[in-house]
């Protein structure tokens, strides 16, 4: 018999801080193409401020590929990321606008 009168369950998280982590925390990030709103150096500082790790090239360890607005066609970095995705690697390819939104999230 259920003694819980209001039929609610208590959910206990093992580590509540995990729910508050920024998507870039401990993730490896690569840029391709020039950003339209800031220098790559400034963007890299923002990534590091959120705990991200900058990479110069796409590898199997890459988590995010940021596509700058000022690019001509599909870069070799984007082609490499797409190949790795097709082989089952979890790489997120995101446009500059989404990157800007992600770095606008306030740190807890």
Image: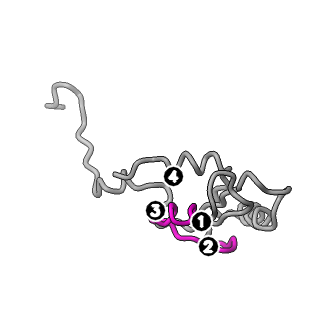
Contact, mark 2 vs mark 4 (Cβ under 8 Å): no
* Residue under numbered circle 1: 29
Camera-side mark, 1 or 4: 4
Q: In which quarter of the image is residue 79?
A: bottom right
Location of residue 91 with respect to 55 vertically, above or below: above
| C-alpha gap between disc 1 and disc 4 | 13 Å
Q: What element carries label 2?
A: loop
Tell which circle, 1 or 4, labels the residue nearer the N-terminal end.
Answer: 1
Tell me the quarter of the image containing the N terminus: top left
Tell which circle, 2 or 4, labels the residue nearer the N-terminal end.
Answer: 2
* Residue under numbered circle 2: 55
Tell which circle, 4 or 3, labels the residue nearer the N-terminal end.
Answer: 3
| Residue located 31% across and 56% down the image | 17
Camera-side mark, 4 or 3: 4
* Residue under numbered circle 4: 103
Residue 81 is situated, as x and y percent measured from the top left of the image, at 73, 64
Query: In the image as oriented, which residue stretches furthest toward the top?
Result: 6
* Residue under numbered circle 3: 25
Q: Residues within 10 Å of mark 2 (few under 14, many from 20)?
A: some
| Residue located 51% across and 65% down the image | 45
Q: Is mark 3 on a helix, strand or loop?
A: loop
| C-alpha gap between disc 2 and disc 1 | 6 Å
Q: In this image, 24 relative to 68: left or right?
A: left
| C-alpha gap between disc 3 and disc 1 | 10 Å
| C-alpha gap between disc 2 and disc 3 | 14 Å
Camera-side mark, 2 or 4: 4
Q: In this image, 91 relative to 47: left or right?
A: right
User: What range of the chain is rendered magenta?
Assistant: 42-60
């Amino acid at each position: 018999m259920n003694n819980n009168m209001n039929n609610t369950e208590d959910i206990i998280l093992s580590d509540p801080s995990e729910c508050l982590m920024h998507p870039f925390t401990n993730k490896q990030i690569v840029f391709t193409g020039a950003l339209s709103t800031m220098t790559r150096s400034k963007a890299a500082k923002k990534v590091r401020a959120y705990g991200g790790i900058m990479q110069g090239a796409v590898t199997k360890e890459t988590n995010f590929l940021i596509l700058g607005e000022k690019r001509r066609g599909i870069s070799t970095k984007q082609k490499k990321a797409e190949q790795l995705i097709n082989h089952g690697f979890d790489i997120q390819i995101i446009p500059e606008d989404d990157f800007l939104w992600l770095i606008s999230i306030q740190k807890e």
